[in-house]
Image (cartoon, rainbow, N blue to C red):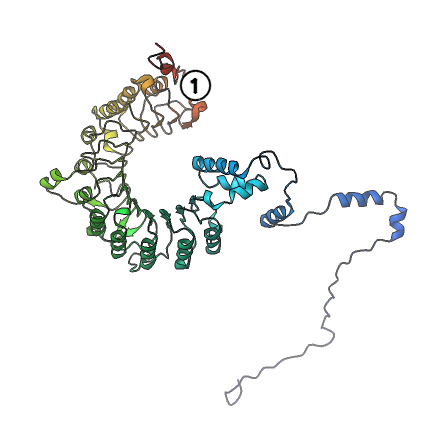
Amino acid sequence: ISENKIGIKLCIKKASDATVQPKKPIRKRARKPRSLNEDSSDETSPEKRNRRAEKPRPKKTNNNTEKRSAEEAYTPPKDQSVWANGLPESVLYTIFKNAVQEEGCLPTLIRLSEVCTAWYKVSQQCSLWRTVDLGTWGRDRFKTEPRLKWLIENRLQHATEVGLANWKVTNVQCVLDKLLEAAPGLTTISLAGWKALSTDHLMFLVQNFKSLRNLDLSSVNAEVNANKTAVGQTSMCNAIKEMGSRLTHLHLAHNRLSGIPQIVKALATHCPNLLLLDLSNVNTVAMSHGILHIEQLQHGCQKLKVLRITNSHINLSTASLQEQMESPGFPELEELSVASLADEARLFNDEFLQRILKTSTKLTLLDVRGCARLTHDSLIRLPTWDLKHLFLSGCSINRDMGAGLELIASKWAHSLIEFDLAWASATKPLDDALKALADKGSESPLKYLNLCGSSVSLEAVKEVLANCPHINAINLASCRGLPRGVKRLLQGAQEIAELRENLGVTLKCAPGAQSALAPSSPTDT
């Protein structure tokens, strides 16, 4: 430090010339030129040059450049097949239209467009692109806003049902404007995963698309207390009131909702034609926001066919006996899903099930997995007699040592196509239930049986395999009462046949044998 304590003195010693070592120059390796005399004198050099010409060094390229070069290098053949030039475009259009109706728009039209030039031309007609699900087909990295705008302008001009789930859209209003210009007659739209969707966007959607009746707003709200989210209480009530009687399908799954009582009241008041209500995996801000007034919904939505409350923090409201008696129920209900995890299993009991299904004679699917407070009495008293899909995994019914499981199987043995009895721990009731299914013989329509983790016996499994000819899948994973080699999921006719062979089971009545023996018409007799 200097004497005045203002600066710092540095003493630098210069090295001598002898100690300084010069830097070595960087030598670049140069290619040695070949002389013409050596090429002409070497007899094998022309052959070597020909081999190098035949086998060029491959260039290091990624998959995108290879695909791009392949597309640029492709040239359609001049002579097309008779299926291209020999058929008029109207015939090809009719064939493509039938294929789209059977298999769906995507990826059918994409595959057809890659056949030849004529097929490509027909497949690009916008009238074929009516029902398009862009959320299922396509990778996430391609779901960008510019690509979506191009698809709307060039493919969706006649679309009526569009799925746009999980597309990365920031300027939502611009996309909705283009969609309105291209497809004003839209009836179904899925905006699942659109985090930027706000209240104004939802009102624009329901006010300008006059034919819109199916709305999917799953996984929309990103924040708990988002005031401008499209699935907020005020936003949903206004949209429901605006749509009115034309709303038939409403999906609100995977959202954090507030004001469910107000939303249900708006549906019951303004939407008499509602057919589907999906509240699966819904979280609520507080318990008071998750109260479902089922009798109010039954009075206003008599045509409801599908009700899903799977894994949701929703509890039925209390109702007096007079309110329950005056409620008309859901006479058209076909599907009810109230499956729950361990935390919500205590909420659903026999009383709730009876209040929902008191008049549902057309029910075909019932999912009560994980509902620990349900008993077999409530299921036996259900008014439906043609149940096709029944899921009982994790219920207390599977642990009951009484005859309840056998009574349930006997009641719907003539109609059950899919039966879930996973993790049933009571061996004798489970075996008796399977034998009740097997007693129907060739009349049993059973195709899918889930016995994963259950204590089923080998004799009961053999009984089902011998008497149920239509069974196509059986899950025997983790069944401790079965021998090794069969404890897994078996699917398809070949694996089921191998299982019968390994267990030494012979099918008593093959599929269609009963109908083959019976006379087809009175004139045949």
> Dot 1: within a 10 Å radius of its alpha carbon, few (fewer than 14), some, or many (20 or more) residues?
few
Residue 122 in picture, x, y percent from top left: 53, 42
Residue positioned most to the left: 322
Residue holding disc 1: 502
Is residue 250 toward the left or the right of residue 160 in the image? left
Is residue 413 toward the left or the right of residue 46 in the image? left
Residue positioned most to the bottom: 4
**Is 433 above or below relative to 234?**
above
Pick the front one: 373 or 120: 120
- Residue 290 visible in the picture: no
Quarter location, residue 401: top left
Amino acid under disc 1: Asn
Residue 434 in picture, x, y percent from top left: 29, 22
**Is 297 above or below relative to 17?**
above
Quarter location, residue 278: top left
Pick the front one: 119 or 145: 119
Pick the front one: 478 or 419: 419
Residue drawn at x 38%, y 17% as measured from the top left:
512
- Residue 18 visible in the picture: yes
Residue 415 in picture, x, y percent from top left: 29, 25
Residue drawn at x 56%, y 35% as measured from the top left:
87
Is residue 409 toward the left or the right of residue 107 in the image? left
Residue 498 in picture, x, y percent from top left: 44, 21
Regarding mark 1 in the picture, which secondary structure is present there? helix
